[in-house]
Amino acid sequence: MGSDALSTLPDYLREGLEIVSIGINPSVNSARAGFYFATPQNRFWRALNASGLASETLELGRTAVEKLFYTERIGFTDVAKRPSASASQLTAEDFRTGASLLRQKLLRCQPFIAWFHGKQAYGSYLRYADGLRVQEVRWGRQERNIGKSVVFVTPNPSPANAAFSLDVLVDWYRQLRALRDELKRGRA
């Protein structure tokens, strides 16, 4: 079965979320498994657990995604929704359609933080949703918000992105946690 025949992952979005995790697109493995970050070599779950972003240790699986959504107020979506083995297989139309829909979704649910996994994910969003071609996306908190949502960019935890160690990911996730806690205090 080709990746075009795969169903995509459902969005985990609603009002009242603190963070929305935004990948570039679902991997084939995640689409087949039915949950985000399903590849065992993906470092998302290890970095999340080590950072304290969640209040308890979670094992990768659909139950963990649902616990993050319902208990921790962390949602999930993607810039483009078509599953692929690599982001390089996505088309401009995948991004044009996906980024525009993502913008609408984020404006509707208004999380505290829109958390992009990777500069490519955020750069693609800016290009196709806002018509901006930025020379360089930086890590961390961005100058532009999406509605009321602060934008935060961390390295992609994919095993294909080996340039960033687990320790580096954990540090960025801790910074994300600190920003979330700061924003919660400010809105209390």
Image: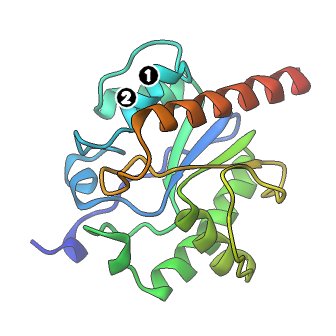
Q: Position of 185 compared to 127: left or right?
A: right
Q: Position of 172 compared to 135: left or right?
A: left
Disc 2 crowd rating (10 Å Cα; few below 14, some 14-19, many 20+) is: many
Choose between 27 and 50: the one closer to the eye.
50
Q: Is residue 28 above or below residue 50?
A: below
Residue 128 percent coordinates (x, y): 63, 80
On the rendered image, what quadrant is the C terminus found in?
A: top right
Q: Amino acid at mark 2?
A: Arg
Residue annotated with mark 1: 49
Q: Report the residue at 53% width, 13% height from top.
A: 55
Disc 2, SS: helix
Query: Is the image coloured rainbow, by chain, by secondary structure, or in one colour?
Result: rainbow
Disc 1, SS: helix
Residue 115 percent coordinates (x, y): 62, 47
Q: Is residue 22 above or below residue 94?
A: above
| Number of the label disc, if any, that sits on residue 68 | none
Q: Could you say which quadrant of the image residue 96 lies in?
A: bottom right
Q: Report the residue at 72% width, 25% height from top.
A: 178
The reply to whether the C-beta atoms of the residues labelled 1 and 2 are less than 8 Å apart is: yes
- In the orientation shown, which residue stands out farthest toward the bottom? 92
Residue annotated with mark 2: 46
Q: Report the residue at 73% width, 83% height from top.
A: 131
Residue 21 percent coordinates (x, y): 54, 45
- In the orientation shown, which residue stands out farthest toward the top? 56
Q: Is residue 5 above or below residue 159?
A: below
Q: How many marks?
A: 2
Q: How many angstroms separate mark 1 from mark 2 (CA)?
A: 5 Å
Q: Report the residue at 52% width, 78% height from top.
A: 95
Q: Amino acid at mark 1?
A: Asn
